[in-house]
Amino acid sequence: MESLPKIIAVIGPTASGKSARAVALAKELNGEVISVDSRQVYRTLDIGTEKTSFEEMAGIPHHLIDIREPEETYSAGDFVQDAEALITDMHARGITPILAGGTHFYFEALLYGLPPSLANPLLRTELEKLSADELFTELQTKDSRRAERIDPKNKRRLVRALEIIAEHGSVPERTTTESKYDVEWVIIDPSKEELRPRIDARLQQALDRGLVDEVRAVRARVGDARLNEFGLEYRIIGEYLREERSEASLLPALSTKLWHYARHQKAWLRKLSV
């Protein structure tokens, strides 16, 4: 039986140190890093996504970072296509593929495939007229399981979920349980007592480095609806820029939301060890 292609996957909650561990492994194992992050693909989203800097890369090639403009889109299907090509190329060159990031849906899509579905342009046009709140309410009604796992403010993903439901009745579970790759998981899972202060420290550093100005510039380019799709930092600071919250509320609000997100990431990690 032919062996599966080998990859190393570095995973962990936000602020756990995935990027640094990936670089260290790449140095040790003659590797290159493939970013598994749905936001770091976009240029100008640097501070809010904690994008690995040139200095932090330490000479290790990094892939799938800064490959789209924020006005463009990048899907899980795009990621799978790009990552598969990179992995094939690395193996051909004798390089160890090291995948690192926090977008677990991308990992699952790469390893097990995406649920099959067809685009429905007419339905999509109607759904895009609705607000994110209206879309999320409809998703809760039609598929509560999927609603629990989705960002309720990410309009593009809400529309896509409802498209799939229109075709299948619900968002289907993947039927494939066997990975296309031989995966060595490197799991970084700090305790709450360690991780929560790291999240707060990283947030304060991001604000000090100019996160608000970054969000203001991105918002000027793409508008509020698209801004909300870029995650918690961009959505909450967008509220501040629209004068819907105070500047003093930014750090505590972001801290609470990101810790909640980190807990969801930790729950996904626990599934791997079951």
Image (cartoon, grey):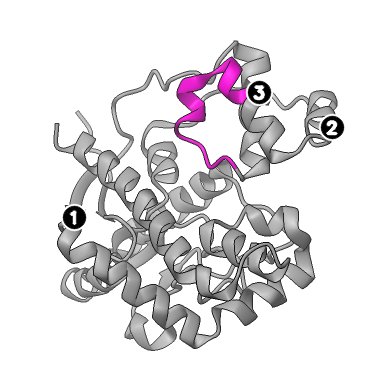
Q: Position of residue 225 (x, y in %)?
A: 74, 53
Q: Nearer the viewer, mark 3 or mark 2?
A: 3
**Left or right: 237 in relation to 27:** right
Mark 3 to mark 2 CA distance (whole Å): 16 Å
Q: Which residue is mark 2?
A: 125
Q: Position of residue 111 (x, y in %)?
A: 36, 37
Left-right relation of 150 to 183: right
Task: Tell me the amino acid under the disc marked 2.
Answer: Thr
Q: Earlier in the sequence, mark 3 or mark 2?
A: 2
| Precedes in sequence: disc 1 or disc 3 | 3
Q: Which residue is mark 3?
A: 138
Residue 226, can we see it?
Answer: yes
Q: Can residue 31 be seen from the camera position used here?
A: no
Provide the residue span drawn in magenta: 139-152
Q: Is residue 11 above or below residue 164?
A: below
Most foreground residue, 271 or 214:
214
Q: Indicate the secondary structure of the residue bearing disc 2.
A: helix
